Amino acid sequence: MDQLTSRATDYAKWYNDLVLKAGLAEHSAVRGCMVIKPYGFSIWERMRDDLDRRFKETGHENAYFPLFIPKSFFSKEADHVDGFAKECAVVTHYRLRNAADGKGVEVDPDAKLEEELIVRPTSETIIWNTYRNWITSYRDLPLLINQWANVVRWEMRTRLFLRTAEFLWQEGHTAHATREEAVAETQQMLEVYADFVEEILAIPVVKGVKTESERFAGALDTYCIEALMQDGKALQAGTSHFLGQNFAKAFDVKFATTEGKQEYVWATSWGVSTRLMGALIMAHSDDNGLVLPPRLAPTQVVLVPIYRKPEEQEAVVAACHRLAEEIKALGIRVKVDDDDKRKPGWKFSEYEFRGVPLRIAIGPRDLAAGQVELARRDTLSKSQEAMEGLAERLADLLEEIQKNLYAKALDFREKHTTEVNSWEEFKQVLHQKGGFLSAHWDGTAETEEKIKQETKATIRCIPLQAVEEKGTCVFSGKPSKQRVLFAIAY
Amino acid sequence: MDQLTSRATDYAKWYNDLVLKAGLAEHSAVRGCMVIKPYGFSIWERMRDDLDRRFKETGHENAYFPLFIPKSFFSKEADHVDGFAKECAVVTHYRLRNAADGKGVEVDPDAKLEEELIVRPTSETIIWNTYRNWITSYRDLPLLINQWANVVRWEMRTRLFLRTAEFLWQEGHTAHATREEAVAETQQMLEVYADFVEEILAIPVVKGVKTESERFAGALDTYCIEALMQDGKALQAGTSHFLGQNFAKAFDVKFATTEGKQEYVWATSWGVSTRLMGALIMAHSDDNGLVLPPRLAPTQVVLVPIYRKPEEQEAVVAACHRLAEEIKALGIRVKVDDDDKRKPGWKFSEYEFRGVPLRIAIGPRDLAAGQVELARRDTLSKSQEAMEGLAERLADLLEEIQKNLYAKALDFREKHTTEVNSWEEFKQVLHQKGGFLSAHWDGTAETEEKIKQETKATIRCIPLQAVEEKGTCVFSGKPSKQRVLFAIAY
């Protein structure tokens, strides 16, 4: 395998090369659309299944809504149309015909749609149009629905997983009888996301709310989790929106209260996407390739038999499978790679590159000595380990690696979160050190925009756990009640 | 709940009403596209998860390919373009703009795509275009990949689940070094489908191959499983295609053999879709609503507490939960419906309509007597059962129901499969009794077409288990070696 570009040399190239070489994803023949390769998809599947379990445990059900949205739907919610109906894929025709020159096919001009259809960039409009028929009384509430789907937002500059025209995501859309219940749902889902990203992806996140200018188009409040990548840039890892009654009013969704009054329904929506794959990669991986937290790794332990002669092969392969059975019995995802077509050296480099947390090699001499060679991906350390009782030690070690990755990422974030108190300091820290800048802001969109223009830094969030603290805005010098988090973001 | 139209009165209306009233799916605001409602989706999820497990057990991995396919790709495989590139959704633009009259948005004429994109009706072309870069040597083979995705085929006449413009499906696309291996894969996946449909959906299927005119566009052979619905019509429940080297040649996918020669790769593809929901509904359900086989039912047992006074409520609800814990401990999917907003009568009718296999009611008198009322959905019978040891008996009963549904459907199919030996007999049986007609056919597409024109019956398949038997074609009188299965199909 070719050497990977180092992070220090070119971080963007390191990321792209890693995604390609680890077999996670690649660009497709369709501009801006990616192919998620089997290994990448198996990691996404594990994210999806874990999230899906958490959604169901909090009372949500899955459903499926149409891929297409009539163009006119976007105009019904005033803010939403500006945010979403611009860069999108538009279906105008429904038939092809054989070309007159006999070469290939062409669009049949007679098959023009009366109203164009938009490939969903997000589904609030089509879903709230549907909810109108589903909700008539308080008995129908709350309505707690999630959808796993593909969405399309036409992007000019794309990056694998981080920004692609088509991506996979889940979008929760809930309906409630009261404002309080909807706000509680919005906050609950933020917690679900935060727990998932911290417990499974081993990435610490800051929970916060967006400023008005960074809010979802059509929301009254957007809650978010923000993570820090190894290059000091922030990445928004998930959002949960309190939509108020905006979509209920736009699509006329009312319910009869227990007292028989007609009221508009309160809404939330929340989503995470294949972007999380980008966060995962950039939070933990190194110049040797992908590093996966054990709870997420499709394969947690790989066993590679080492042999030269056929009589050796049989014994070491058998030993690998015996050990694998013991490991599997503990619920660990283990794989024996006894593929005869590949050499051990190729396999070592492959599994290191793919971030398998633990690699075990067994050769004839190991077998005789009752031991194995154990390689740990996060620290790249190797040790000789007795076969006796190994499976149990591996289980402990996987938990240790999971904790270690989280601790390392948290330590990095803490070291790269800086309180800045002047505009000079702001610019100096931002450009020399990067990371999160905790600074006072005067609360105006005008200052926010000027800071963005001058430095590319945006307000990632107003942290939920921030303490009230009097100060003056780093940019305008006007009074401020609380620090907010700035960063340059993906 | 309104009465359901009976099957005898209007089978098509019965089906549509059932799908709507059981909360499975409904038509959306987008012509031809359906909304799969939470209950319908939970059944589809169980199908998907079981199939996915079977795919993985047979060595397949999931991946994800783009939603869009460049128009020119369809022209590369000659048969494929005729079969698939006609009725489809065509993306021609990538941007909307504010309309000049200030009302809503319109397509931006400056944002026209150079080459139109087709929303995938099936993914052979984009996938084989991708495989060209993935396959270079025999070491890369076999490549065993599956995709769960939405696809779009513009249909003029749509029916929920059975024929919709957008539907959900899985499509397996595999690449092999030899013809034999690809044929074996095609046959293996047919067996996987047949086992799944028979074991989980409790629907007996006939395994067979399609005639040339019914083959998938671009395939050398299409294997299929065919099921019989209660109205005597056949439904194709899954297909598995041996594609030969057609797509490898169209997209130039070659591999180096162990001897270093360059050869074209052999291909298969196979798929089942949300159409299986239609098969499920039509195979088992009755005039009282949905009937679900226990292995597929999201809820296998529902407990409904019956009470009038608050002091009764506490005791019976607690008893329901205690019993539910015992039932759950056996791995049975059980639900207590203690929702105070609905009456028991409403719940009884709701769960009957939704096909929950077993319903238990517990009132104060039952509690005192240590018994429950048990209602069985498949037979609609009720009995008093002792609480003692009930959970174990329910487990047995669920298995019995699963077998009973399969046996009933098999019995129906056997009674509606008729050997016919003359053209008069063919027409008479077809129109009076329906079902499968086992008849001799001369093997020509011409005869097949004439029979279809005259009777609407098509050859559903040439059964794999048919015995060679000399005879004469029911239509042409020409010699035939084997009977084939005719039916009017969905």
Image: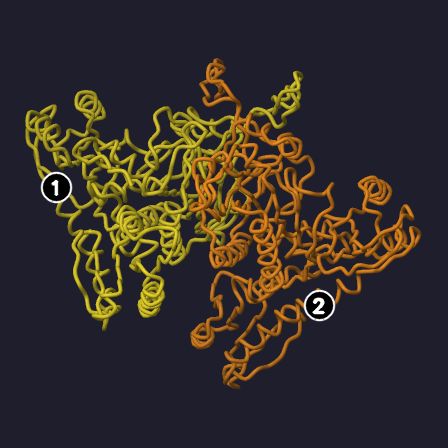
Chain colours: A yellow, B orange
Camera-side residue: A355 or A117? A355
Q: In the rendered structure, the residue with mark 1 lies on which chain?
A: A
Residue at 63% of width from left, 51% of height from top?
Answer: B238
| Mark drawn on residue A176 | none
Question: As shown in the figure, which amino acid type bears the numbered disc 1?
Answer: Glu
Q: Quadrant of residue B228?
A: bottom right
Image position, residue A487 (x, y; %): 18, 33
Q: Quadrant of the N terminus of chain A?
A: top left
Residue at 21% of width from left, 48% of height from top?
Answer: A204
Q: Quadrant of the C terminus of chain A?
A: top left
Q: Where does label 2 land, which residue?
A: B408
Q: Where does label 1 land, which residue?
A: A468
Q: Is residue A199 visible?
A: yes
Answer few, some or many: residues within 10 Å of disc 2's Cα (few below 14, many 20 plus, some between 14 and 19): some
Answer few, some or many: residues within 10 Å of disc 1's Cα (few below 14, many 20 plus, some between 14 and 19): few
Label 2 SS:
helix
Q: Is residue B273 visible?
A: no
Q: Quadrant of residue A31?
A: top left
Vertical relation: B324 (above or below) B482: below
Image position, residue B160 (x, y; %): 64, 46
Residue at 64% of width from left, 41% of height from top?
Answer: B219
